[in-house]
Amino acid sequence: MMKRTLGFVALGAAASLFLSACGGAATGGGSDSADSFDLGSTEVVNASDKAGGTLKYALAADFDSTDPANTYYAFNWNFSRYYARTLLAFNTEPGDNATDLIPDMAVDLPEPNDDFTEWTVKIQEGLKYEDGTAITAQDIKYGIARANFNGGVFTEGPQYFKAHLDQDDHNVYDNGDDPLAGFDSIETPDDHTLVFHLKDSFSEFPNVLTQPQTAPVPIEADREALYQENVLSSGPYKFDGQYEPGVKLNLERNEHWDSDTDPVRQALPDRIEVEIGVSQDEIDERLLSGEIDVDLAGTGVGPAMNARLLDDESAQGNLDNPFSGALRYVNIHLPIIEDVACRQAIMYAADRDSMWRAWGGATGGDLATSLLPPAIPGSNTDSDLYPSADNKGDLDKAQEKLDECGESDGFKTNIAVRTEREKDVQTAEALQQSLARVGIDVEIKSFPSGDFFGQYAGSQDYVRENNIGLSVSGWGPDWPTGYGFASKITHGDAIMATGNFNTSELDDPEINGLWDDALKTEDPDERAELYTQIDTLVMENAAILPVVFDKTLIYRSDELTNAYYHPAYMMYDFMALGVDRG
């Protein structure tokens, strides 16, 4: 997200400034003209205030969790807003201002103290859950506490609050009848005020308040891991029956939601339906036929449909091809490939041109040689520590590094991929062929997306027991700074036993120190200089093999209204969408 993994962001977790143009005047319905290609990247397409109908989504894999406490897939940070309001949100328009913060449940943006260690936010009065009961500041406090201080019940979500709140060890599920007793890092002096107390200065803290973990949860409604079956809605839609993992999730209107309190959601459809476990090829065909409206994963059509649509002149007006703000990359797992020279051998041997082509070539993104995407201040995209002719790999340098680490004949390891992500698999196959040229024997292991980080590539035990030396990932920014993009995948403090998104398990003292320094640095230019240093050090450590700065090819039907690409969510803004079937 990405986590904001992309389905990786993560999420992670939420934002990018890749969009090159401001939002212009909204356009009318879809067009078969090539002049309308990629129009949704900069404008609202098919603008309409028509309400009603059923908006239909399909998903090849599954949600990591429908519980706002326990999700880091980018598409779910976007989708969960249907039923889970947050303190803040991103601006509801395309273009350069899209990543500006605006209030959601809050009355206004939070107020800091002089050193950014204390933040106060007021919430609106009159907010209600689907059962008509009032939403309080204490519910938001509990939602944050259960997401971050739960004794390991939840493993998938970000841990910004746990990392930055000035809070002693706590477990809301092992704290008797009062789960918030002793949880003093968030004060609630009244039902509509929250005061956050942080360990250290954190000038970027308001960005964290956009995340699903700030959704309110009443203590009496919490069912721990089972809460995801039927989340109590604070948004315009509520669960219609229980979420059925691997099958479906349907939403219907929440009659207690008040549009006057909500600057974020248009809530045009009467009903939202998600069909889960549909193959990517089938999703693509059904998008074109009009049987479904949106591919929930938000990562664009699959390779077969990609080629077909680009060759179809009549389809050009229904296609968007924005930069997603994400990096697609391969983790090199340090506990498995311990010697830095062996990791650097992989970096030199990789045929990055073939990996770029596997990801889709020019429509799939720009070939990447560094960590931070070009729109992130401090990015180092002109740097390439592992150059080669035509990006085909430097086999002589790779062999030198293998000799240096005592593996002259190469070695064996496994690479983990998400079964449903065809481009991930093709990227792994391209890398497999590259590394075989220097005797590095890589076997591809496929795992379901929904459990990829919880049980497989992000599980320390599984990685060690099964020689997972590499894994294919994608990451999008939680917000558009170096810290918001990369801290959760490169800071040692982010390493977790399960649900681990620092999947390389990079824990370098110098890098960690620079991240910590950035939190205390108020000047954004000075922070950007620190982020450049971190970018270089991550590449020197050979912990991450960049593949592409991602673009997506999205098919947009004529029936879909208010479609525009939102860089904070790295896909269409789901809250704006409606359907007009004539």
Image (cartoon, rainbow, N blue to C red):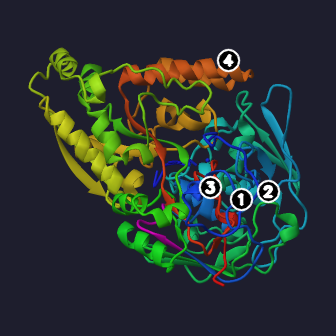
Circle 3 sits on which residue? 39
Circle 1 sits on which residue? 178
Distance in Å between CA atoms under marks 2 and 3:
28 Å
Mark 3 or 1: the one toward you: 3
Q: Earlier in the sequence, mark 2 or mark 3?
A: 3
Of residue 81 and residue 49, the one placed in the foreground of this image is: 49
Task: Name the spot of residue 164 as percent of width and height, x first.
Answer: 66, 36
Circle 4 sits on which residue? 526
Distance in Å between CA atoms under marks 1 and 4:
44 Å
Determine whether, in the image, residue 557 is placed left or right of residue 203: left
Circle 2 sits on which residue? 104
In this picture, which residue range is highlighted in magenta? Answer: 57-64
Q: Earlier in the sequence, mark 3 or mark 1?
A: 3
Cβ atoms at labels 3 and 1 below 8 Å apart: no
Determine whether, in the image, residue 178 is placed left or right of residue 276: right
Cβ atoms at labels 2 and 3 below 8 Å apart: no
Mark 2 or 3: the one toward you: 3
Image: 188 above or below 296: above
Amino acid type indicated by mark 1: Asp
